[in-house]
């Protein structure tokens, strides 16, 4: 079957680029001497995650319990649920553990630690716990100088039902960097903060076997991971325009795209109208703050060749508007009604979230496989 026969919009995955991206990070982690715990939230598919686990211990990261259910049903046992835990999710987590899963939860407060311990005792279980560390002010977590770090550690160490497994941080600030040198600096801040927090816990007589760090930018540019036991990353499998804008990858490394049909022309406005709006591409405008604003995505041919300076400049729910970023005239013969183009996404995770499957290609327009995704929470 050929891409040109598909009903649009749909999600296309270039297997060759996927394999190259995965192999590159796996080799990098091997060189730095640290295990990779791939994040399943980007792929949401077992075929891809199995590729990512090649040569790795076999442990993954998840961001939803739907992912945890799905990956466990495909034989993956060890997972870190890397979102601060809420009370309503603990019965679900306990159910997975009773079936044989090893689910480690994340928290950054005394309140979370107390309700996790109480729920675990109710189920007759012991929940492994990581303390979330704030290394860059990006989001959640306990800072290095906050006494709360040791307070939480002591509670987890003494309470029945929970056990302190270590610390986890995410350098989300790396997504706002303006240069590769800035990413390298954030990677070192990420490493230093997590390791320093582990040392504080140990100095207070508390165990800290796991020191977990990770983001796709810092995984690509960290120069030293001494003291770190594992790196988490997910977007590296596909990459996207935000990663390209950061200098983490090239546009040609991006493995996924949205296939869309031309459904109209507005020649007086110099617009091509497609059937991929913000529902198909997502509203993520992550490149807007970068040196080059890529709109809602860059435009490539059906065969996968770039159409220079063409972007999706605006969207409605089911309509995308393609225009020339510099205002140049469009080559209308290249956009016949019913013809197809491919759009590279700003944010791979957000764009893929609306689709239930990948149409896998070998770099051409021939579909070689169909891989299904798991969505929702």
Image (cartoon, rainbow, N blue to C red):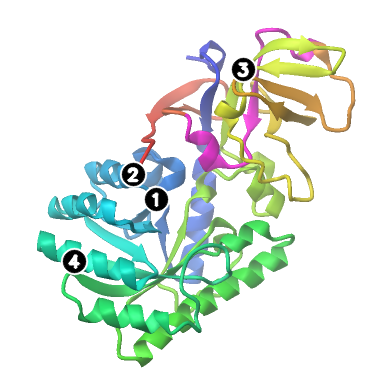
Give the image quarter of residue 341.
top right
Give the image quarter of residue 55.
bottom left
Tell me the tag on residue 275.
Answer: 3
Q: Earlier in the sequence, mark 4 or mark 1?
A: 1
- Left/right of residue 36 with respect to residue 7 in the rendered view: left
Tell me the tag on residue 67.
Answer: 2
At label 1, counting other C-alpha atoms closer than 10 Å, the crowd grade (few under 14, some 14-19, many 20 or more) is: some
Q: Nearer the viewer, mark 4 or mark 2?
A: 4
Q: Which residue is mark 4?
A: 118
- Left/right of residue 207 with respect to residue 149 in the rendered view: left
When the figure is inspected, residue 186 is found, relative to residue 321, above or below; the finding is: below
Q: Residue at x 79, y 18 (%)?
A: 271
Q: Residue 201: percent from the left, percent from the top?
A: 37, 85
Q: Nearer the viewer, mark 4 or mark 3?
A: 4
Decide if residue 169 is in sight here.
yes
Contact check, label 2 and label 3, Cβ < 8 Å: no
Decide if residue 207 is in sight here.
no
Q: Residue 203: percent from the left, percent from the top?
A: 37, 92
- 117 vs 281, nearest the viewer: 117
Q: Which residue is mark 1?
A: 63
At label 4, counting other C-alpha atoms closer than 10 Å, the crowd grade (few under 14, some 14-19, many 20 or more) is: some
Compute the Cα span from label 2 to label 3: 29 Å
Contact check, label 1 and label 2, Cβ < 8 Å: yes
At label 2, counting other C-alpha atoms closer than 10 Å, the crowd grade (few under 14, some 14-19, many 20 or more) is: many
The magenta segment: 333-354
Q: Earlier in the sequence, mark 4 or mark 3?
A: 4
When the figure is inspected, residue 51 is found, relative to residue 84, above or below; the finding is: above
When the figure is inspected, residue 365 is found, relative to residue 58, above or below; the finding is: above
Element assignment for label 2: helix
């Amino acid at each position: 079957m050929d891409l040109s026969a598909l009903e649009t919009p749909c999600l296309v995955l270039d297997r060759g680029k996927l394999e190259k991206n995965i192999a590159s990070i796996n080799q990098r982690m091997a060189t730095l001497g640290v295990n990779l715990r791939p994040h399943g939230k980007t792929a949401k598919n077992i075929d891809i995650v199995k590729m990512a686990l090649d040569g790795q211990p076999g442990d993954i990261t998840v961001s939803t319990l739907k992912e945890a259910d799905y990956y466990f049903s495909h034989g993956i046992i060890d997972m870190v649920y890397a979102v601060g835990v809420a009370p309503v999710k603990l019965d679900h987590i306990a159910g997975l553990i009773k079936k044989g899963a090893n689910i480690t939860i994340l928290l950054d407060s005394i309140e979370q630690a107390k309700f996790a311990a109480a729920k675990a005792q109710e189920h007759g279980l012991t929940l492994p716990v990581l303390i979330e560390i704030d290394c860059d002010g990006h989001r959640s977590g306990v800072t290095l100088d906050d006494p709360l770090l040791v307070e939480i550690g002591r509670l987890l160490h003494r309470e029945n039902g929970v056990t302190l497994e270590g610390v986890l941080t995410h350098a989300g600030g790396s997504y706002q960097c303006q240069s590769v040198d800035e990413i390298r600096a954030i990677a070192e801040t990420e490493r230093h903060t997590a390791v320093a927090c582990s040392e504080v816990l140990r100095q207070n007589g508390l165990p800290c076997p796991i020191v977990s760090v990770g983001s796709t930018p810092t995984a690509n540019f960290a120069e030293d991971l001494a003291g770190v036991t594992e790196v988490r990353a997910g977007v590296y499998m596909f990459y996207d325009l935000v990663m390209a804008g950061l200098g983490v990858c090239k546009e040609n490394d991006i493995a996924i795209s949205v296939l869309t049909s031309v459904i109209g022309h507005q020649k007086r406005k110099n617009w091509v109208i497609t059937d991929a709006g913000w529902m198909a591409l997502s509203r993520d405008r992550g490149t807007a703050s970068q040196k080059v604003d890529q709109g809602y995505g860059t435009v490539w041919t059906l065969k996968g060749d770039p159409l220079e300076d063409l972007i999706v400049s605006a969207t409605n729910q089911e309509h995308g508007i393609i225009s020339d970023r510099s205002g140049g005239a469009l080559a209308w013969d290249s956009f016949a009604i019913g013809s197809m183009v491919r759009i590279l996404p700003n944010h791979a995770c957000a764009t893929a979230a609306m689709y239930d499957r990948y149409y896998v290609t070998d770099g051409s327009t021939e579909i070689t496989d169909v891989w299904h995704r798991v969505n929702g929470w």
